[in-house]
Image: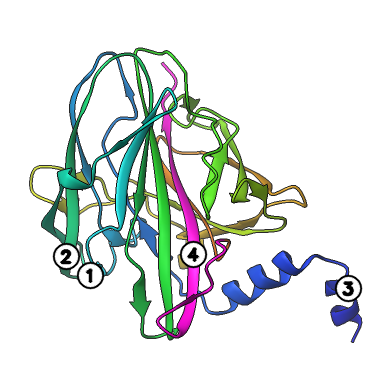
Amino acid sequence: MLIFKKLKQFSSPFLIALSCMASLSANAHFQMLYTPELLHAKGGEISFKMPFTHPAASGHVMAVDKPEAFYMIKKGKKTDLIDTVKDIEWQSAVDKGHAYQADVKLRGLGDYVFIAQPSPYFEAEEDTYIQQITKTIVNVGNLPTDWNKDLGLTAEIVPLTKPYAIYEGGIFSAVVKSKGQPVPFAAVEVEFINYVPNMQNNHFAKEPIMTPPSDIFVTQTIYADANGTFHFSLLKAGQWGFAALGIGEDKMYKGKTLSQDAVIWAQATKLP
């Protein structure tokens, strides 16, 4: 009873976050929108790999229908890129699964904010759908432009730190939002891409970058504060994914519960 009284002091988003956490597996689902480097000296063509998987453990690759949307924001202008998306197969240590790839060209200096909105995926074990609206920000020429813009998405993580300019050991800060409004006490899962993706052959590396001391370290779980803000130290060079769970306004899909999540990717760079 005392615990219940304590919980009543928190807002309903906090309770929703707790209910989301109750059904989590040891390794979290992450929609990847991966390109090897988020900071480029000049423009040119880059490729994205988009498996829906468990990147910290080279885990199960989940088959998802073609993305509902894939687009880019640059200096406030939106460019539809859905026609660049094509089918691939992605190999993990566990299995091979259906995934997607997109090849795009960077033209000019500034930030390129890429958004992938995948089709909802049915998670049979949880009897629920998952849709992870995913953001990856690529910079060209060290000219910041759009990296901290709030796009008003139904599920979004708005960075307070440039996600492409963080030293190893530095802090990544962001605000969890839904339709421009902060989400208090949102549950945020964090995973390190511990198996480097092979861009040519569409598979994770066989060997990890590091070995976690135990399974509980594979997926970190933190909570945003009352203002929807969170902070996390990127202790290892490489790319890190942040997934804010169940924050979107859409809660049902095809008669089932829908967890509409927000994902963002950030990269830590070694000190010179």
Name the front one of labels 1 and 3: 1
Task: Give the Cα separation between the discs numbered 4 and 3.
Answer: 27 Å
Mark 1 or mark 4: which is in front?
Answer: 4
166 to the left or right of 13: left
- Quarter residue 60 falls in: bottom left
Q: Which residue appears at 44% of the width and 21% of the height?
A: 271
Please report the residue visible at 27 percent of the width from the left and 58 percent of the height from the top. Answer: 67
Distance between the alpha carbons at the discs numbered 2 and 3: 45 Å
Mark 1 burial class by Cα count in 10 Å: few <14, some 14-19, many 20+ = some
Mark 1: secondary structure: loop
Which residues make up the magenta segment?
248-272
Label placed on residue 63: 1
Q: Magenta segment: does it hold 266?
A: yes
Callout 2: helix, strand or loop? strand
| Residue 135 part of the magenta-drawn span | no
What's the coloring here? Answer: rainbow
The answer to whether one can see residue 169 in this image is yes
Q: Tell me which residue sits at (9%, 43%) in the image.
A: 200
Residue 98: mark in rendering: 2
Q: Residues within 10 Å of mark 2 (few under 14, many from 20)?
A: some
> Neighbour class for label 3 at 10 Å: few (<14), some, many (≥20)?
few
Going from N to C along the chain, the mark reached first, 1 or 3, is 3
The disc labelled 4 sits on which kind of residue?
A: Gln
For disc 4, the marked residue is 260
Q: Earlier in the sequence, mark 4 or mark 3?
A: 3
Q: Is residue 208 above or below residue 27?
A: above
Residue under pointer 3: 6
Residue positioned 90% across, 78% down in the render: 5
**Residue 71, position in %: x, y?**
31, 41
